[in-house]
Amino acid sequence: MTKRIIYVPGKNLKPEPEIHRVQLWRCLLAGVRRVQPNVAAEMERAPESFFLAPWNHILYRRHVSLDEDIPWIDRLIETNGPTEEERQEAEAWHKVAIKIMYAIGDHFHGLIKWIPDQRIKAMIADTAPYFDNENGIADAIRAIVKRLVSEATGNGESVLLIGHSMGSVIAYDALWQLTHLDQHPCDVDLFLTIGSPLGMRYVQKHLLGGHTLHKTFPRGISAWENVSATGDLISLDKTVHDDFAPMIESNYTESIRDHCGGVYNWFRNHQGLNVHRSYGYLVNPVVGQIIADWWRGQHKEKPPVLVAHRGYPTKYPENTMIGYEQAVKAGARVVETDVQLSKDKIPVLHHDADTMRMSGVSGSLFDLTLAQLKQLDIYCPERFGEQYRGTPITTLAEFCTFMESVPEVEMLVEIKPHSVEHFGLELTVDRVVAAIKPVVDRCAIISFHDGCIAYARSAHQVRIGWVLPKWNKQTEDRARELSPEFILVSRQRFPNNSCKIWSGPWRWVVYVVDDASQANRYAAKGIRYIETDQIGEMLAELDSERGQ
């Protein structure tokens, strides 16, 4: 299917359309390249897929030179991310104070025009002609977007509609007008809003369909992704899911997701840091990943990926071969296991440093050789009584031999800190990595011990995952330093507010969840990897909900 990206810019004077389009396309490709270089290379060969909806000249009657900004755009593309100083500036206390002032004005709709801030006054002055449709100006602006969307729909193209700032409002209104007034078929695969004020009450009151007693919404949007950067005061209310959820309930869209935790816009020019500029949004890896997923047809909401936590511990002893065999038989495609070292430094599957809970015999794992451990029964007597007596301890090497027979299954191998502390970091990691070598391409080393996974990556170039010990600013900063493939967090620590979820290159894994509806709620937020103790039951429930 042919693809079309339609970009609707925000307010203010813009360069000549073709000059503007070239720089936007450069930044968009740079953002995709940060996360999916192969996709960026593919997109780069299709520049004709990128369309600009140049509306600003209708309102402002002239264009502006881009010459001063081009060196700064070059710098933006060449820089991997914000500096620590730029992060701190985006989070500065004075911006928090201004945000509170804005929020009060927006909550009491009539007060916003009296806020003594030049940005608010400029926003109201610039948007008034559009919202009031002075001399039909709003109709003329929307016509540009409508024509591009209608043309793409008529051609059967896959459409990504991007709206930045005021451009997101125009794009939303254009879709509403197409589907409600023009009665024109509309098919937008993905609506991507960046730095959008659509969460603000002031703006919502002025939207088409928003001023009536019963709000109406545009149709024909398959999915909506909204990205808001830290410190961006134009996207004052950073979430749209809460305000536009009726679109999901009315089947006007399948999903609405907000990305606003730890998203930074590091565009800077001679005037300083500007966390609202479109170029800075487009190079951001969060935006890049969303666009890459759409290009590859992977943007639709996906079901949870269930991870068999310690195998199948509600039916079989945890971290045992029988538990993993039955978990895979039930349909698990990702399994998680815990690893400790024996006295003779052999990696074995075991969670505790003591043998009592699993064998009924008290003793330190580190005082027993593998031969001695093999004499114990790993049968979890407190839970299962005598049912599984005779079950032996499993070495990591034995487990990996089993994993070689199921090439469709991935594994998360957790190195327990007890072994790291007892035997030393490097020895413990080296022994574990040696054991997983036959299946290393399907494996990630995970641990609470951040030094352990940092060494695993630097010394062995394996995939890593960090199990968060706490949820705070220090662990967020450390996560960004580690840049792991996975971050694992207990559901008790995981925030309910989407804006508090850190955006990054990792995949989130939540543990332990044994309720299918809760797993689906996490997946709707983009948190797809769910560890469960009840792998068979959970898979059956999810299949039943999907009608399989």
Image (cartoon, rainbow, N blue to C red):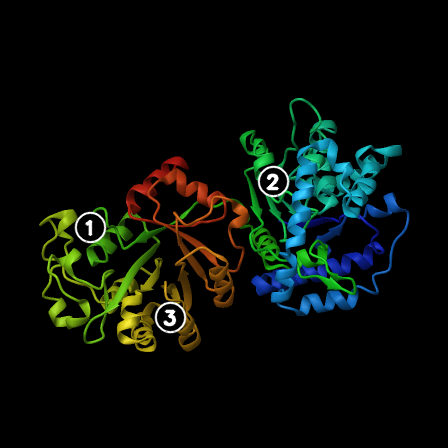
The quarter of the image holding the C terminus is top left
Residues at marks 3 and 2 touching, judged by CB atoms closer than 8 Å: no
Q: Which of pointers 3 and 1 lies earlier in the amino acid sequence?
A: 1
Kind of residue at disc 3: Cys
Q: Which mark is residue 467?
A: none
Q: Which residue is mark 3?
A: 452
- Residue 106 shows up from this direction: yes
Q: Position of residue 353 (x, y in %)?
A: 22, 64
Q: Which residue appears at 62% of the width and 61% of the height?
A: 88
**Furthest residue toward top:** 213
| Element under disc 2 | loop
State whether residue 161 appears in this view. Answer: no
- SS class of the residue under badge 3? helix
Q: Residues within 10 Å of mark 3 (few under 14, many from 20)?
A: many
Q: How many marks?
A: 3
Give the residue number, with chain letter if any, for mark 2.
Answer: 240
Residue underneath mark 1: 316
Q: Mark 2 or mark 1: which is in front?
A: 2
538 displayed left or right of 213: left
